[in-house]
Amino acid sequence: MAEKKLEKQHVTEIEQIRTKFAENNTEIALATKEIYAMQQRTQQLEAYQEQLLQQFQTLQSQETDLVNKLKEHYGEGQIDLEKGIFISES
């Protein structure tokens, strides 16, 4: 098997390509880590959103119960919270 010395220019080109591959692999790893972190944060935000939506449904139910309770007590009408009064429709 015969050996032939590489020209300096070709050695330099090979080294440059290797360096660029290494830099590219590092950037791929960083991007992958960032995507993973964003996915984790998204999951956390979605879980928090679900809690808030459940609270919203509970509040809606409580509001409906209160409205029905007030209708039974005062009848149909409107409430003026600033004055603390009930205004009957009839």
Image (cartoon, rainbow, N blue to C red):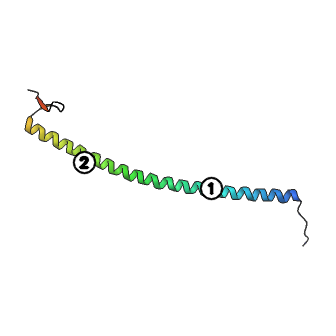
Please give the name of the residue rendered at 54% of the width and 53% of the height, measured from the top-left corner: 35
The percent coordinates of residue 12 (x first, y second) are: 83, 57
- Marks 2 and 1: in contact by CB < 8 Å? no
Around disc 1, counting alpha carbons within 10 Å, would you say few (fewer than 14), some (14 to 19), or many (20 or more)?
few
Task: Tally the marks.
Answer: 2
Where does residue 54 sit, x and y in percent of width and height? 30, 49
Q: Toward which corner of the image does residue 24 lie, by quadrant?
A: bottom right
- Check disc 2: other Cα within 10 Å, few if <14, some if 14-19, many if 20+: few
The residue tagged 1 is: 28
Residue under label 2, please give it: 58
Is the residue 53 above or below the residue 30 in the image?
A: above
Residue that protrudes farthest toward the front in the picture: 83
Of the numbered discs 1 and 2, the one sitting upstream in the chain is 1
Q: Which quadrant would residue 81 be assigned to in this image?
A: top left
Say which residue appears at 72% left-offset and 55% top-offset. Answer: 20
Query: Mark 2: which secondary structure?
Result: helix
Quarter of the figure that contains the N terminus = bottom right
Q: Picture coordinates of residue 58 (x, y %)?
A: 25, 48
SS for tag 1? Answer: helix
Q: Residue at x 62, y 56 (%)?
A: 28
Instruction: Pinpoint residue 82: horizontal percent, then vertical percent.
Output: 18, 31
Tell me the distance, in whole angstroms, between the alpha carbons under discs 1 and 2: 45 Å
Q: Can you tell which mark lies on residue 54?
A: none
What amino acid does circle 2 point to?
Answer: Thr
- The extreme top residue here reads 90
The quadrant in which the C terminus is found is top left
Residue located at (20% from left, 42% from top): 63
